[in-house]
Image: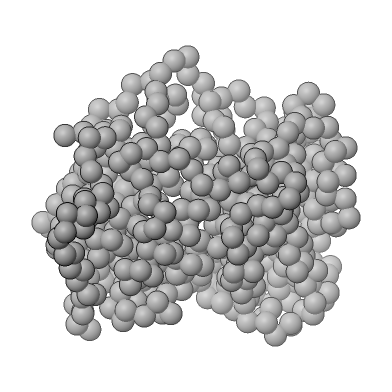
Amino acid sequence: MRCSKRMTRRTFLAGTAAGGATLLVAGPRVFGANERISVGVIGCGGRGTGHVGWVKGSGGEVVAVSDPDVGHMARAAKKAGGDVKQYQDLRKLLDDKRVDAVAIATPNHWHALSTIMACEAGKDVYCEKPASHSIWEGRMMVKAARKYKRIVQIGTQQRSDPAFITLREKIRKKELGKIQWVHSLWYAHRGPIGKVDGPQKVPDGVDYSLWCGPRKVVPLMRKRFHYDWHWFWPYGNGDMGNRVIHTIDDVHHVFDIGEDVPTRMIGVGGRFQYNDDATTPNTEFIVMKWKVPIIFGSRNLPYVDEKGNKKGTSVYRRFGRGFRFSNIVKCEGGFFAVSRGGGAVYDNDGKQTEKIKGDGGAGHMRNWLEAVKSRKVEHLRADVLGGHLSSVMLHTGNISYRVGERVGVEQVSKAVEGIEEAEETWKQTRDHLKRNGVDLGKERPILGPWLTFDPKSERFTGEGADAANALVKESYRPPFTIEDRV
């Protein structure tokens, strides 16, 4: 039976309760010190299949897999080995009593719903980044985890990297003095995805309705079915939500931001030079006003040298250094530049004074499995609440961009005027685009409004609020809905 005619587990439970039945929710299972936790992997693309090996290498056991694409599912099952059940419909996996916990690596638009359904089913959860596809559903994830007493870890593995734990301590001790600004970026060279002239055939073995889940079932309008969903707003969050979310989460973690997320933000960028079907930007930066200015950046166009030669990934240059993927924390006495796996401390002339070692967050999955055994949320390095709040920073910046308008270069310059690192970022962005043959007089950039966000209500206020609030909560296609009260 196709998924659009079936009830979600939540709908079934609600109907049972309304009929007068008593719903017994079992308490958390108690694990022995050496007992292997049985995990179901939901979403078996490249990342999900990677989860199979990661779970096994961290002391867990994969007993079930699920994916709307039966080919992906079979590949993951083969990698897991042994008696692995395959469920094309994730709801059947959640009903499998052998499964203690699930690792979710679905497209972003399924993250919240599958996490909430797993919590309701009594399963602990490891969910890939970003935690949510939108602000409201992220808060629902937190509520579900707390209500059902589940251990929910987000796949922002840099929280488990010793490099960022070290950076956090150095910042707390004010080793380089007062912080002046923060710039977190992850540049990745990505070409255009192509342009189709009509609806495409869904690959054989894919239940497309199930893949769409909470989104409307619309004709497939992209050449590559898998992965390229990242570049369409209904399913993905662009490269800001694909790559840069890691560095956004680093900032939330390292600076102990907690619920005190930035309240003012603006987004700038565009999808320059590419005439393709994607809807997300290939060049974007977000400026946030917090205790210090924070800038997040993404670029997909290549680096072009002075002679016009294209040489892979773009580079951000300051203080005599080049950065493609890093968190630059500028202080009075120098700066830190730390990325996955390590980094360094520099003086104001760009001279390295100390190395910071890391391991890329190799123990992140093991940390989750250990917390599943201990039943202590505080043992998690990337609890769902932190993942939600760092995703709020992602979403608010992206929302500014999405409600923005095409403007001239001078209007962008005026919008970031007085914020030194934002001015420098815009300057370097203009140069980067020019070298790539972009005429900003013709391909005008998109400038979002300076939005005001209320962290308590998780809504926008003031100028531009109506348009921005329309993107805080999405529409959900029955029966794949998220209730207002989980």
Does residue 208 appear to the left or right of 1 in the view shown? right
Q: Note whether residue 306 is visible.
A: yes
Q: Relative to 165, say whether 156 is above or below.
A: above
Question: Measured along the vertical axis of the image, is residue 255 above or below residue 324?
Answer: below
Residue extending farthest to the left is 83
- What residue is shown at x 17% (from left), y 54% (from top)? 19
| Along the viewing direction, whichever of 439 and 14 lies nearer the viewer | 14
Q: Which quarter of the rendering shows the C terminus?
A: bottom left
Task: Work out whether residue 402 or residue 424 is closer to the camera in this orientation and state it.
Answer: 402
Residue shown at 40% from the left, 77% from the top: 377
Visible in this render: residue 76?
Answer: no
Q: Quadrant of residue 290?
A: bottom right
Residue at the (44%, 47%) spot, across then down: 108
Left or right of residue 192: residue 27: left
From the top left corner, tell me how far across and down residue 176 is, in percent.
77, 79
From the viewer's perspective, is 359 left or right of 310? left
